[in-house]
Amino acid sequence: MNENQTAQTDSIVAIIQLGRQQRAVAHAAEESRLKLEASQRNQQHQALLDVLRSAVTAQLPEALHPYVDWDVLCLDEWKQEYAIDIDIPECARIVITFSREQGAWIWNHYYAILVPDHVEYHYEDGYDIHYDRQVETDLPLALAIAADAYPRLQQLQAERNALEAGRVDRVHEDEMRLEKEADDEESHIASLLHILQADPVLRAFFHAVIAYRNAQTSWDAQLAGQYESMNALERRYENDLTDTRRDAYNANEELLASRARVTELEDQVTRLQATRWD
């Protein structure tokens, strides 16, 4: 490589290095911009949540504040309604709903008590407790209903846990059974192969049986194909016969019509001759 080529190579390397630096600077600027936007969005969302929290604490009785499930609130600026859980020890769950009306969060002053009713089974989720919603506007009455429903909730939770444990055990038993059947099948095949390897006559007979079954399958397929071909040929002959009968009928009708026209012409000629002689 001469000096001119070396200089050109150094120039290209310098340009590449400059491009890499420019790309690094651009990536750093873009990353800073995205972080700033994310921080601004989080601040906006947090401000919205603070407004909602203030509305909840301002409108809800102070005795319920320690039991509000704040985790249900999410950073969603477009959400127009929140169902907030109130979990009081030894009480069924109470749900309150806050709706956004003209930019303000408003509570309808309803307490929805989830009164446990029975255990039901869902194909995807397994066993779960079904609740009846009982709505009240009076706090003492709502708390009394929630407290009275708690023993039933404990009973149904134990029932659900027992049923779910039984379902899990049955699933495990089914898996173990299928695994055992697969192992037995593999053991049976291994034993059969061992016997075949030790007995040349039985091995030859076994191969003959397999060949016969394969041939029988092939014959059955051929017979089925031939049967279908015969049915198709029979349908075609029936259609051809129907067409031939229809054509013959039409030809006979045309012949009868032609004979009628000839007879009519003969009658006309006879009448003309008779008139001429008269």
Image (cartoon, helix red, strand yellow):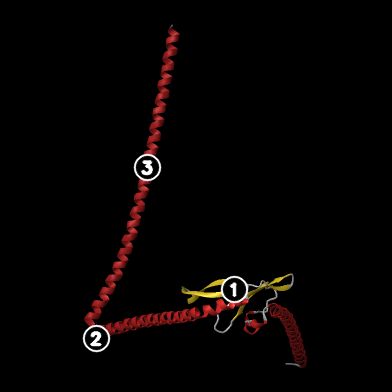
What residue is disc 2 on? 198
Image position, residue 190 (x, y; %): 30, 84
Q: Position of residue 268 (x, y in %)?
A: 44, 16
Residue located at (39% from left, 80% from top): 170
The answer, for residue 125, to whether it is visible in the render is no
In-image side of 167 versus 193 (left or right):
right
Residue 214 place in picture, x, y as percent: 30, 70
Frontmost residue, 87 versus 163: 87
- Name the disc covering residue 121, or none: none
> What amino acid is found at the position of numbered circle 1 in the picture?
Ala
Which image quadrant for residue 102?
bottom right
Task: Name which quarter of the figure residue 182 lies in.
Answer: bottom left
> Which amino acid type is marked by label 3?
Thr
Q: Above or below — where is 202 with respect to 7?
A: above
Tell me the quarter of the image containing the N terminus.
bottom right
Please state which of residues 134 and 171 is positioned toward the viewer in this rendering.
134
Q: Is residue 105 above or below residue 261?
A: below
User: Which secondary structure lies at badge 2?
Assistant: helix
Q: Please report contact status of discs 2 and 1: CB closer than 8 Å, yes or no.
A: no
Mark on residue 112? Answer: 1
Secondary structure type for disc 3: helix
25 vs 42, nearest the viewer: 42
The dot on residue 242 is 3
Give the residue drawn at x 34%, y 50%: 234
